[in-house]
Image (cartoon, rainbow, N blue to C red):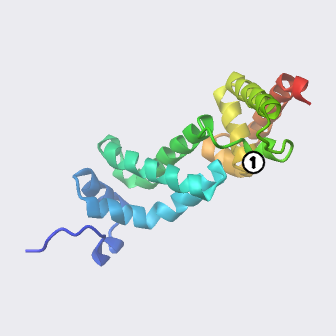
């Protein structure tokens, strides 16, 4: 009689994603670990491109994988476990961008405004961040996602098109509208 181990066994490396997902849905932690060993590096790299920081990517990836483990029973097609994991990670990464930790500044403002602790500078920076957050919040969801993927995540137009499931030309149009809207709403800060 063999005992269940906490680490994936070598024989799990040969099993398809579909079977591993089915086993993980049934509660087999080793099968889920094998899926993570197989796809974890890709998920982390993808998340780091969105959030722009390897440290944040590690945290977001860990949260996403924990969520995936808890929500495995909701997976309708075990053969599609990899895209499902990527969607879970994507949602967590975008949630992280919408609600970054309070100590982090948006990267696009770092170069333009040096960080100082003088109250006037802090107040101006906070007002700018609030204005940018409001401008982003005012955008339609898909335009906001396009803008964040391009400007913060630094993804190519093709990568954004794949992520959102829309044509490259639509990405270009949505980005142009998002930039124009943000530019108009941030006019007073230039």
Above or below — where is 139 with respect to 28? above
Q: How many marks?
A: 1
**Vertical order, 110 against 82 (above or below):** above
* Residue nearer the viewer, 122 or 35: 122
Viewport quadrant of the N terminus: bottom left
Q: Residue at x 69, y 44 (%)?
A: 149
> Residue 47, percent across and down?
58, 52
The quadrant where residue 48 appears? bottom right
Residue farthest to the right, as pictured: 190
Q: Quadrant of residue 133?
A: top right
Q: Is residue 29 left or right of residue 144?
A: left
Q: Position of residue 26 (x, y in %)?
A: 22, 52
Task: Indicate left or right for 96 with 180 as reference.
Answer: left
- Count neighbours of disc 1 (C-alpha within 10 A) and say few if under 14, some if 14 to 19, many if 20 or more: some
Is 74 left or right of 37, judged from the image as shown? left
The picture places residue 159, in percent across and down from the top left corner, at: 68, 51
Badge 1 is on which residue? 157
Q: Is 162 left or right of 59, judged from the image as shown?
A: right
Q: Residue at x 34, y 74 (%)?
A: 14
- Hey, which quadrant is residue 136 in on the image? top right
Most extreme residue toward the bottom is 10
């Amino acid at each position: 009689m063999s005992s269940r181990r906490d680490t994936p066994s070598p024989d799990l490396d040969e099993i398809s994603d579909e079977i591993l997902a089915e086993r993980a849905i049934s509660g087999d932690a080793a099968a889920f670990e094998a899926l993570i060993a197989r796809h974890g590096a890709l998920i982390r790299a993808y998340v780091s491109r969105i959030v722009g920081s390897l440290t944040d990517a590690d945290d977001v990836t860990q949260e996403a994988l924990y969520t995936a483990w808890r929500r495995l029973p909701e997976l309708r097609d075990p053969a599609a476990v990899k895209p499902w994991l990527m969607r879970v990670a994507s949602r967590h990464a975008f949630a992280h961008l919408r609600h970054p930790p309070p100590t982090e500044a948006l990267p696009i403002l770092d170069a333009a405004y040096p960080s100082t602790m003088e109250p006037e500078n802090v107040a101006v920076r906070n007002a700018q961040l609030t204005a940018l957050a409001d401008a982003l919040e005012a955008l339609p969801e898909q335009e906001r996602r396009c803008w964040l993927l391009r400007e913060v995540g630094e993804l190519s137009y093709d990568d954004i098109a794949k992520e959102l499931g829309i044509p490259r030309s639509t990405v270009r149009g949505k980005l142009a509208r998002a930039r124009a809207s943000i530019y108009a709403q941030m006019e007073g800060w230039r």
